[in-house]
Image (cartoon, coloured by chain):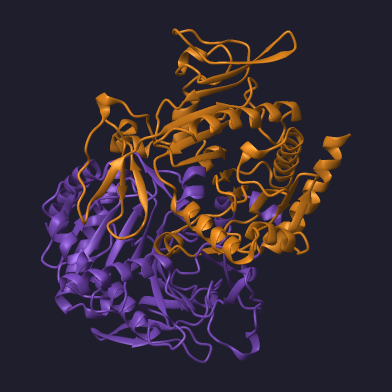
Chain colours: A purple, B orange
């Protein structure tokens, strides 16, 4: 199988993974995605483990103790709590002598191999145990499994960045509806993270402390504040590009989920459960995407950006890079604040 | 009515227009767009001119001669060929002493007024006369009307960039299905254009000629070439971020549609008719967006980028700015080449 190729735009610092092994015929693009999906059984449900590649990580509960393992020798673990597997249609793939190539590159055409990893974390044996309804104990396993895989992938020598993200709902790009998160390890730092990293380094050098810490302390006093607990704070960002966008920050300055204490893992689980439960109630289980932003630098402050998909980015956004948002973040925050408060009351009782 | 506000992200050079006059309640976001649309009569169809603001430009045919005019004194012209009106829900609005404000701005919060214009060009009295099926003569009127409005807007002193774009299909963000193009004049040069402009200036200074001219001459000899006529060339770009993406370039070096000769206007009309007709046939009238890229600088080469909407940008794309495209541009070009060739045969007979 040929490797995927990373190509750069002629002029812009904009990269695309050309993924031929996922290639379809033109006629396939005219068939509705929904129709295709309903034909298949869920490969993520218990009993269908043989439909997926061997797991890189499983959490098992044995006599009340958590045990971590992976699938070996063609066998598939059963009875798992969470399960991490290579994506069957990876965008990035590990180095392999057989598939190595030397992509063409000159002034106009810039290209490199899409080296890396693309994994899927199956968040629960229960098909519908999404963060909005999940048990807090289950979300703690999810966070810990993400930490395990992040920790493993981030040390690979050709990995420059690890992206953890979640797509919820078919119109948000979730091709399977079983609760899952994706992990992509890639050979470059994405542009958005490069810019955040540079800005936070500059601010740190000039001011001696973290720009995100300053933003948090201003936003919690603003109309855009939404919710907090002992470890985390949620607000609608000043320049929200999506209606009802919200960002989740650890209160304590830390660069990635590797720095989380045991208590912070619990607080994050509670934060996810209440915010996504509240979002579901407020907006009738909307499709959404979220992404972790993490950089292993002392001046960077990791966070999660949540993008509900309630509007369409069209010709204007795509050809200029400027967004139009019809929902002011201050009003979004007001609605989300009330929804999260109600959800919080329910989760605690 | 308060002015819309342009806000900048805390760190990224990413701008959003916060548009409160388009604000809706949270419950509105859970109603399907389709349902809302079908309730209304088409305000762009002849006879419904009173449902729109007065036209800034109409083309009328009188005794076989074209006459240009605008709506005045509360009257609305009837019998128009093309009609340009202010958008009823503008993202950008002209300077007006009453609505002027002084948005808050400091290190963290950067904001300015969304000064400018937002217009809609109704491309035909015929509801469904989209470029894919339009008469070439009608498309010539469309191009000339775009030139007239571009020429007017680009000279306004607080206008730094004029974006012309088209959304086709409700899933591509077209809120009305009547054939129309949008024009937004704004008080800043968008980031994508800034980067293209800087790269093309640098190349011009170093090499004495246009980078786009060089790209065109390489791409017409590549597997990504799709179609050309005497004035225009179409190819699939090297780093296509959308399946079946194609770019349309004038062969002659020119910075905007203001430089088009009368013959080039006809060739562009033919190019639009054949390419969108071919796209419609190949992929069952897919939703798409397109945008003009124009900068009034001698080293810039204007073009149109066409983005069929056949995949979903999800959490990975949104949180990293890196794209995944499952359709290699070389294969897209092969299919589009054949589809445009067949369409060209049909249009000429």
Res B229 visible = yes
Q: Nearer the viewer, residue B300 or B167?
A: B300
**Which of A197/A41 is in front?**
A197
Task: Tell me the residue at 59%/31% (across/down).
Answer: B146
User: Would you say residue B325 is visible in this rendering?
Assistant: no
Give the image location of residue B260, x and y in percent: 68, 38
Q: Quadrant of the N terminus of chain A?
A: bottom right
Which residue corresponds to the image point at 42% horizontal and 48% vertical from the top-left? A322
Tell me which corner region of the image, top left, top right, bottom left or bottom right, holds residue A19. bottom right
User: Looking at the image, is B86 positioned above or below residue A202?
Assistant: above
Residue B188 lies left or right of residue B219; in this view the side is left
The residue under the point 70% across, 26% down is: B138
Q: Position of residue A261 (x, y in %)?
A: 17, 79
Left or right: B228 with respect to B310? right
Residue furthest out toward the right: B349
Based on the displayed image, in which of its 4 quarters is residue B291 positioned? top right
> Is B46 situated above or below A13?
above
- Relative to residue A87, is residue B77 depicted above or below? above
> What percent of the width, then of the height, locates residue B209?
65, 59
Where A98 falls versus B71 (above or below)?
below
- For the C terminus of chain A, the quadrant is bottom left
Marks counted in the figure total 0
Does residue B95 appear to the left or right of A22 in the view shown? left
């Amino acid at each position: 199988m040929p490797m995927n190729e990373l190509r750069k735009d002629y002029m812009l610092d904009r990269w695309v993974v050309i993924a031929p092994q996922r290639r379809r015929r033109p006629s396939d693009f005219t068939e509705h995605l929904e129709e295709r999906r309903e034909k298949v059984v869920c490969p993520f449900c218990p009993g269908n483990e043989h439909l997926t590649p061997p797991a890189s990580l499983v959490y098992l509960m044995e006599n009340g103790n958590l045990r971590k393992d992976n699938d070996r020798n063609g066998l598939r673990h059963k009875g798992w709590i969470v399960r991490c597997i290579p994506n069957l249609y990876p965008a990035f793939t590990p180095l392999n002598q057989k598939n190595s190539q030397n992509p063409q590159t000159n002034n106009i055409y810039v290209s490199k191999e899409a080296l890396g990893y693309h994994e899927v974390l199956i968040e629960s044996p229960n098909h519908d145990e999404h963060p909005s309804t999940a048990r807090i104990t289950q979300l703690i396993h999810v966070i810990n499994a993400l930490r395990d895989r992040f920790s493993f992938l981030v040390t690979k020598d050709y990995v420059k960045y690890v992206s953890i993200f979640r797509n919820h709902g078919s119109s948000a790009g979730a091709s399977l509806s079983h609760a899952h998160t994706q992990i992509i390890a890639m050979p470059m730092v994405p542009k958005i993270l490069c810019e955040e990293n540079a800005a936070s380094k500059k601010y740190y050098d000039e001011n001696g402390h973290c720009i995100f810490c300053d933003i948090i302390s201003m936003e919690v006093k603003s109309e855009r504040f939404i919710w907090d607990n002992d470890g985390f704070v949620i607000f609608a960002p000043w320049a929200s590009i999506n209606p009802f966008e919200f960002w989740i920050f650890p209160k304590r300055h830390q660069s990635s989920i590797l720095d989380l204490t045991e208590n912070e893992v619990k607080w994050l689980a509670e934060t996810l459960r209440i915010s996504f439960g509240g979002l579901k109630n407020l907006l009738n289980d909307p499709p959404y995407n979220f992404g972790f932003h993490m950089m292993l630098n002392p001046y960077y402050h990791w966070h999660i950006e949540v993008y509900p998909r309630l509007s369409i980015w069209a010709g204007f956004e795509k050809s200029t890079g400027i967004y139009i948002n019809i929902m002011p973040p201050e009003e979004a925050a007001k609605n989300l604040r009330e929804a999260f408060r109600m959800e919080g009351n329910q989760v605690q009782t």
